[in-house]
Amino acid sequence: MSITRRQFLKVGGSAAAVTTLYSVGIKPSAEASTRSFRLHYSREITTICPFCGVGCGIICHVRDGQLINTEGDPDHPVNEGTLCSKGSSLFNMASVYDEQGNAVPNPHRVTQVLYRAPKAKDWEVVDWDWALETIASRVRQTRDEHFVQTNADGVTVNRNPAISWLGSAMVNNEENYLFHKITRSLGILNIDHCARL
């Protein structure tokens, strides 16, 4: 059977139209009456993708305090709605799928502050206040012990070679600017970022 180009385009266009209508929720009446649109009654919250630091916009759909969907933000100037493979799988950071194919909260996601004491084998749960105070005191102690005011030639350098800093892709430019000011005020020279290629 031979098929002309015009017939091929008609059949292909019809199939694409039916597939598109079905995927956006326009379905035969029997199924449509029993199943509602999955994002119905959800609230849209915009955020930034946490993976590489490019700053792609993400729309998170939340219902009853639970994340139910993530997708690219078409109004965001960086990605204009498109996402890479990592950004497309962002929903799977918070959820996994059970045997029936339903999304359930990821049981391996860390939701508390964990601390492992030096030479200990197990992690223990601590509160945020203790963790922040401990981090601040250890940074201060390390800075005081290893701060170098002048080098061997007597030149003022004001640096701290004992601490390094790793930046974050989860913050905006203004926050990264403040972090950089903090690191320079501590005399940190070893500054890097998780998105450096």
Image: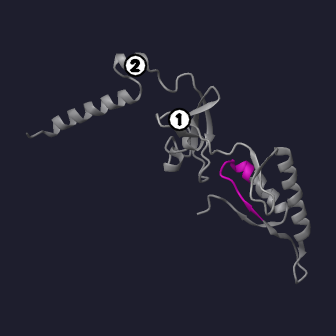
Separation (CA) of disc 1 from disc 2 = 21 Å
Residue at 75%, 53% (x, y): give it: 123
Along the polypeptide, which appears first: circle 1 or circle 2?
A: 2
**Whether residue 108 is visible:** yes
Residue at 52%, 23% (x, y): give it: 40
Q: Residue furthest bottom?
A: 153
- For residue 163, which quarter of the picture? bottom right
Give the residues in magenta.
Answer: 164-176
Label disc, if present, on residue 170 of the rendered structure: none
Question: Circles 1 and 2: CB distance less than 8 Å?
Answer: no
Judge by depth and name the residue closer to the eye, 40 or 3. 40
Judge by depth and name the residue closer to the eye, 167 or 93. 93
Instruction: Look at mark 1 in the image and give the residue it sits on.
Output: 103
**Residue 148, above or below 184:** below
Image coordinates of residue 76 in percent, x first then y, are 57, 40
- Magenta stretch contains residue 80: no
Give the structural element (helix, strand or loop) at label 2: helix
| In this picture, residue 6 sits left or right of residue 164 | left
Instruction: Look at mark 2 in the image and give the residue it sits on.
Output: 32
**Residue 171, above or below 193:** above
Q: Residues within 10 Å of mark 1 (few under 14, many from 20)?
A: some
**Residue 152, above or below 188:** below
